[in-house]
Image (cartoon, rainbow, N blue to C red):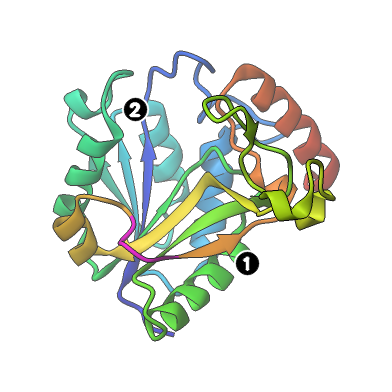
Amino acid sequence: MKQDISFFLPVRKGSQRVENKNTRPFSNVSGGLLEIKLKQLLECDFCKEIVLSTNDEKSIEIANTLNYLNKIRIERRPEHLCQSNTLVQDLIRYVPKVMQTEHIFWVHATSPFVDANDYFQAVSQYYDALDCDYDSLMSVTKHHFFMWDALEKKIANTDDTKGLWPNTQDLDPIYEINNAFFISSKKNYQKFQNRIGINPKLYELEKIKNIDIDWEDDFLIAEILYSQSYSI
């Protein structure tokens, strides 16, 4: 497998919806979601390095305790890119300035159920996809459910030939961007100012791996599921 790829892991302090969500204890893991994610990433021998982009001293402390392979590079992110009102677009523009490899694998600590095997499968699909006219890859969750178009006053993801209430399996699928990961080239970041290109390959994740911790309820539910499934 090609090796010119690195992980980009953004973690900032000051989460408003879930206090200290990346570093507070999670299940029986003292370093929380960040410790879990870094251990998962360290299992991925296909990447050159893990770039932890942060302004949080606790996150840096956790990373330093795990950096026995000298594979984690801590990149102190400017404070203006760590605010609650910071635009994702501004962070995207910043990423290629700190990444040194040809390809960038953007991941999040808030997806604890996405593990090293998922990352390996995803990067394999990414390189295959590049040979099939795709230019990037992002994780999604496929849904078959009724979506209502409030403007048109009708179900959005079907047509009249299927009847008013078709079976859900006959609905046009909806793909949720679940934010677990994005893979693209540094050139795409620079050209499109985006973490995907113009023709991304969709990598479908199963439902439990779709969990993204963004609210306190998400944290509590994920902690219960993690404790039941992964804790020793």
Tell me the amino acid under the disc marked 2: Glu
Q: Is residue 152 left or right of residue 164?
A: left
Whether residue 199 appears in magenta in the rendering, the answer is yes
Query: In the picture shown, does residue 30 fall above or below 4?
Result: above
Q: Is residue 46 visible?
A: yes
Q: Which mark is residue 53?
A: none
Q: Tell me the crowding category of disc 2: few under 14, some 14 to 19, or many 20 or more residues within 10 angstroms, Cα based.
A: few
Residue identifier under label 2: 57
Quarter holding the N terminus is bottom left
Mark 2 or mark 1, which is nearer to you?
1
Whether residue 75 appears in magenta in the rendering, the answer is no
**Badge 2 element:** helix
Precedes in sequence: disc 2 or disc 1: 2
Query: In the picture shown, does residue 219 fall above or below 123?
Result: above
Q: Is residue 27 visible?
A: no
- Residue 223, how many percent across, how many down? 73, 31
Residue found at x 81% / y 42%: 165
Residue identifier under label 1: 117
Tell me the amino acid under the disc marked 1: Asn
**Badge 1 element:** helix
Q: Nearer the viewer, residue 202 or 99?
A: 202
Q: Which residues are magenta?
A: 196-200
